[in-house]
Every structure is written in C-alpha cells, then in structure tokens.
Amino acid sequence: MKKSILILYTGGTIGMEKTSAGYTPKSGLLSELMSKDPIFQHADMPHYEILEYQPLIDSSNMTLKHWNVLAKDLAKAYDHYDGFLILHGTDTMAYTASALSFLLENLNKPVILTGAQVSLVQAHSDARENLIAALLLASRYDLPEVTIFFNHQLFRGNRARKIDAEGYQAFQSPNFPALAKVGSQLQAKTRLFRAQTKLPLTPYAFKERAIASFHFFPGASLKVLETLLALPLQALLLHSYGSGNLPIDDPHLLTMLRKAIQNKTIIANCTQCLKGSVQMSHYATGQALQKIGVISAADMTPEAAIVKLQFLCSLSNDPLWISQQYGLNLRGERSD
Ligand code: ASP
C-alpha cells in the first residue's frame, strides 16, 4: 500500500517569488507547482497532503510559538500518516530540527525537514530534487527521528548546521556521519538511525525563558558580559575557543561566572570550532571553568546547544536537574 506523508509547509525560499521588497513566500504557489508536476504523482512516490501555514514565513522569523504549533500539529496528525516532511527556510532549519527533536519524545516515524537555496519557480532550483528525495526517504525507511535532507544527503537534524549561505551543499553534520545519501541509489546507514520505540509519542512545548549567549573574541569586553549577567538570566551559553577555553588571566571573568552560577544561572560552554568537542579538563583555561560549575555542551552544534537549554529551562527551574539533563544524550544530539 502507498505510504502517506503529511507535508507541513512553513515557508522559506522553496516557495518564494521575487517582489520589490525582495524574495517572499507566496501562498499556494508550492502546492500548485507540485500538483502540476507528474513526478509527484509517480507510482514510486508516496501519497502526500500539504498543510500550508498562514502566513508562510521566511525562517528568520521563526519563534518558539511556531515550534510549539508544529509539534502540536504533528502530534495531532501522528497516527494518520507514515511520515512527515517539514518545508522550511534554510536560515533557521537547524534550530527547528533541534527544537523538534527535543519536543517530540519517543518519535517513531520520519520527520524530514527540507527546503531550497533557490525557489521552485526558477529553472535551476534545487527545490524539486530535495522534495522528491525527501518524500522517497520518508516513505521508504523506518527512520524514527527528526532529520534534515539537503542536496543528496540526510543528516540527523540536531547534528546539522547551515554552512553555506548560497551553495546547494548548504548543510553539514560535522560531528556525526550522514544518515543517508541519495544518488543513483538511496543508500541509508540504518545502523546509525535512532532506535525504534513502542512508547507513545510525548510532545512538549517551549516556554519563553531568559536565555542568552555570548561569543568570545580576543578583546571582548567583560563589561558587556557583566551587563548581560546582571540580568535575571536562567541560562547563558558561552561560545569558547577550541576545546572550551576562555581568557581566565583576567580573574574578573571567573569571579563573574562563579557569582552567576551561585545565583542559579546555568552557564554552558560550547566550542566555536565547527568540529570536535568541548573538553574542559584539557587546558588550564578550561579546567578553571569546570571547577566553578560551568557545564559542557560537548560536541553539540551551537544550534542544538542553545535549543537544548531553551527546552530544559522550559521544563524546569531547577539548575541541578537542568545541568544533569544537559550532560545526557537525550535525542542523539551529543556523543555519549
Ligand atoms: N531566508 C530564507 C529562509 O530561511 C532562506 C532559505 O529559505 O533558504 O526562509
């Protein structure tokens, strides 16, 4: 029997048209083009239905509310479809993929996000290829996780990053291998997939929380960081150098961070490097942070690292519980 896929269409370049104000999504355009294209009616393709959101958005406008609506709609439709495609702008796709991975506990069906660098209305668009392959993957594999399909490759969503603002190879997953490649054949590394579960899907929701991040660079003003920490923050993600190192020669930094942690602000440490992991015990400039209670984002992407803080802080106010959970591999977002 033909598999049935629900396409949740949020917006993005994939269905945009050029206007005097720049590219903006056009309501109805994508479904019209898909319905006219015989490939989407091909015998090998699954049956699909489109749920188009109003208004369609450029994904730069993505918010916690959008994430909550997506998770809720998906949970509502969960039993009626074999898989789900989320059409989304590329700019915040990695954030949304991370968010949905946390929001949908015990997910046992494919949820594939895809989009395009060039609109479907243009002859050289990558949209059609991405759509076709994502639909095929969603209908062929028992893929119990949130993923991103882009330019021939399928990535675990909370491991993926947008690495190119223009090129078709827009996504990469630096710390985790691609789950599948689509060329002349569909090649999936099923042993890398998350394990199937019989537990019922448990959807969660984000709540607005005071969470910030601070990107270090030589010469970064500690006064600015101090101002940020003077706010009643629930969590702060530090973007550190290399394996999690910060300029501790200025004792003011450690004093400030220690005080914030004592005041129940969670301070997490994420590397600025594209690949590799935070290992605070390695250098003195990292160990000092570990000693005062800074927690590690390990090899999580910056997107997953911040979204995981948003997620855990939505569930609890207890810094101890949040710190413990942050250190666990909850949805495949970090190495054990
Ligand atoms: N600005 C667009 C968006 O994220 C870019 C894209 O879709 O590729 O919605």
Image (cartoon, rainbow, N blue to C red):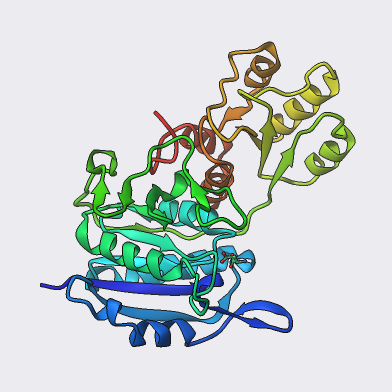
Q: Is residue 58 above or below residue 249?
A: below
Q: Is residue 79 above or below residue 95?
A: below
Residue depicted at 80% across the width and 23% down the height? 255
| Residue 36 image-quadrant placement | bottom left
Q: Is residue 93 above or below residue 13?
A: above
Q: Is 292 in front, or is 271?
A: 271
In this rendering, the count of numbered labels is 0
Q: Is residue 322 visible?
A: yes
- On the rendered image, what quadrant is the N terminus found in? bottom left
Q: Is residue 12 visible?
A: no
Q: Is 183 in front, or is 162?
A: 183
Residue depicted at 82% across the width and 29% down the height? 218
Query: Residue lying furthest left in this view?
Result: 1
Q: Position of residue 23 (x, y in %)?
A: 65, 76
Residue depicted at 88% across the width and 34% down the height? 221
Q: Position of residue 3 (x, y in %)?
A: 19, 70
Residue depicted at 40% across the width and 71% down the height? 128
Whether residue 41 sits left or right of residue 59 in the image: it is left
The quarter of the image that holds ligand 1 is bottom right
Q: Position of residue 257 (x, y in %)?
A: 74, 29
Q: Position of residue 76 (x, y in %)?
A: 33, 72
